[in-house]
């Protein structure tokens, strides 16, 4: 009996050899957003795992959008060059297609790595200002983010677009936008984190406006 799991599937112009997808796994091993030899080893191992598609960990579209100091980014030429090396290696040695998950952590940014406590970075840990739809912290003890202005939203939207362009130049086979886990785009959708009373908040239509604008721009 043939299993659908091991049969090919086509997503737009992308042909996958099977329906097995390795989900994004944050490695917290980047150097100021730049991929390292850790990523060569980690992703190179998965290139020949048998999966049809491997999605690279949450890759942040601007420096302040990183979750932690160790999170991957795609917001500079240095970030792009490092990931180009990683993905070229994976395509050369492996059979899997590679996708990238573009992300912005929003009010969940400026956090410790999980093994450091997974709490908001303290004063002596080089924290950075965070942004969100509303000036509401993620939880007790977390940084209070700045409520985003329309200029902030335009900047973030354009950062997603620029990161997507970099991803295409790198040679990624697929781009995924991160709209979950309470990160920036998801926090616009949720009425728990979006208390705006302008066109970017209120009704579901208003709360969806910015994520949809980002998706359309990308």
Image (cartoon, rainbow, N blue to C red):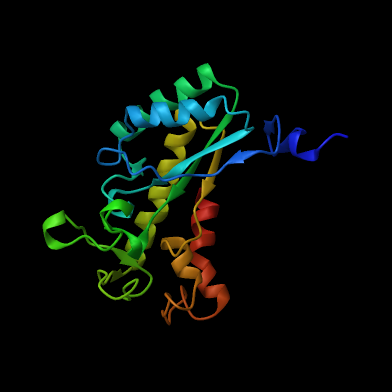
Q: Residue at x 46, y 73 (%)?
A: 200
Q: Position of residue 66 (x, y in %)?
A: 32, 51
Query: Residue 28 sits in which quadrant?
Result: top left
Q: Is residue 113 visible?
A: no
Q: Position of residue 62 (x, y in %)?
A: 32, 49
Q: Position of residue 13 (x, y in %)?
A: 68, 34
Q: Is residue 136 above or below residue 161?
A: below
Q: Residue at x 30, y 52 (%)?
A: 115
Q: Position of residue 202 (x, y in %)?
A: 49, 81
- In the foreground, 141 or 58: 141
- In the foreground, 38 or 85: 38
Number of numbered tags placed on the structure image: 0
Q: Is residue 156 above or below residue 15?
A: below
Q: Residue furthest right?
A: 1
Q: Residue at x 15, y 54 (%)?
A: 126
Q: Is residue 126 visible?
A: yes
Q: Residue at x 80, y 39 (%)?
A: 4
Q: Quadrant of the N terminus?
A: top right
The reply, left or right, for residue 76 in relation to residue 47 is: left
The reply, left or right, for residue 204 in relation to residue 144 is: right
């Amino acid at each position: 009996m043939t299993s659908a799991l091991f049969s090919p599937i086509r997503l737009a112009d992308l042909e996958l050899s099977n329906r097995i997808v390795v989900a994004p796994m944050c490695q917290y091993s980047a150097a100021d957003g730049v991929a390292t030899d850790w990523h060569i080893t980690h992703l190179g191992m998965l290139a020949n795992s048998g999966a049809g598609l491997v999605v690279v960990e949450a890759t942040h579209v601007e420096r302040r959008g990183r979750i932690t100091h160790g999170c991957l980014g795609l917001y500079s030429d240095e970030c792009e060059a490092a990931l180009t090396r990683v993905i070229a290696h994976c395509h050369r040695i492996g059979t899997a297609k590679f996708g990238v998950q573009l992300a912005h952590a929003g009010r969940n940014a400026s956090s410790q790595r999980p093994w450091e406590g997974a709490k908001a970075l303290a004063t002596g840990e080089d924290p950075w200002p965070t942004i969100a739809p509303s000036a509401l912290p993620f939880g007790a003890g977390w940084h209070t983010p700045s409520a985003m202005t329309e200029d902030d939203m335009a900047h973030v939207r354009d950062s997603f677009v620029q990161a997507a362009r970099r991803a295409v130049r790198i040679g990624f086979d697929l781009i995924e936008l991160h709209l979950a886990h309470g990160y920036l785009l998801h926090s616009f959708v949720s009425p728990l984190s979006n208390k705006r009373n302008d066109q970017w908040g209120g009704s579901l239509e208003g709360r969806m406006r910015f994520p949809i604008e980002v998706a359309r721009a990308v």
